[in-house]
Amino acid sequence: MARSKKAHSIIRPRGFFRLNIVKNGKVVGDSGWRENQVTDLGFSHYLVDLLGQGANSKQISRMMLGTGTAPNATHNTLNGELNTATYTRTTVTFSNVGSKTARFTATFASSSSHITAAVTLQNIGIINNTTSAGTMMAGNTYSTSQWNTNQDLNATYEIRYS
């Protein structure tokens, strides 16, 4: 008997983010698309547990910015996260792009007082909670950007399955 060929596919999630700093409606800074790093708990809680309706399953609801280093696989929070006293994380808007991409967008408006003085941003992350609690799904660093109090910051984060 001839051996049958089995159809299979490899699914690989990859994350990407992009930040735009906007002043008076004009983009004054653009990080370009950058690849992220998914944490161990990001894989476990946001992908594996979610598929199986596990007790630890989580969904992304917030985005956060920071001045620190890239997360390693075991990090649960963003290094140097802004406003750690109040943890003002910004709500994301979710959209499904072409059935293989989860897109999360957020605006850090200057009117929301996320910062009280200019800061040098260096990292970004996505998480499930508004406070110091929560589990970061993914994050990474990028070339630094100066963010002033009179500027908005628009961010897009994508998890693409290829």
Image: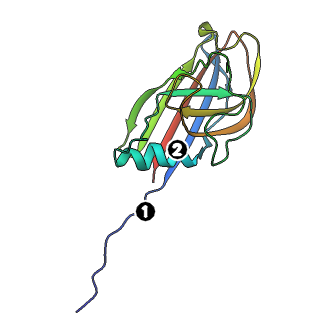
Q: Is residue 153 above or below residue 16?
A: above
Q: Give me the residue at 72% from left, 29% from top.
A: 80
Quadrant of the rendering where the N terminus is positioned? bottom left
The x, y position of residue 21, in whole percent, is 65, 21
Judging from the image, the colouring scheme is rainbow
**Residue that mark 2 sits on:** 42
**Residue that mark 1 sits on:** 10
- Occupied quadrant, residue 56: top left
Q: Give me the residue at 35% from left, 68% from top.
A: 8
Of all residues shown, which one is farthest toward the front?
A: 55
Label whose residue precedes the other's in the sequence (1 or 2): 1
Quadrant of the rendering where the C terminus is positioned? bottom left
What is the tally of numbered marks visible in this picture? 2
- Occupied quadrant, residue 78: top right
Any mark on residue 133, and which?
Answer: none
Q: CA distance from mark 1 to mark 2?
A: 19 Å
Q: Nearer the viewer, residue 63 or 95?
A: 63
Tell me if mark 1 has few (under 14), some (14-19) or many (20+) residues whose alpha carbon lies within 10 angstroms of its own. Answer: few
Relative horizontal placement of residue 144, taking residue 128 as reference (left or right): right
Q: Secondary structure at mark 2?
A: helix
Tell me if mark 2 has few (under 14), some (14-19) or many (20+) residues whose alpha carbon lies within 10 angstroms of its own. Answer: many
Type of amino acid at the residue the image marks with label 1: Ile
Q: Secondary structure at mark 1?
A: loop
Q: Give me the residue at 39% from left, 32% from top.
A: 95
Of all residues shown, which one is farthest toward the top?
A: 111
Number of the front mark, 1 or 2:
2
Q: Nearer the viewer, residue 98 or 48?
A: 48
Relative horizontal placement of residue 2, taking residue 79 as reference (left or right): left
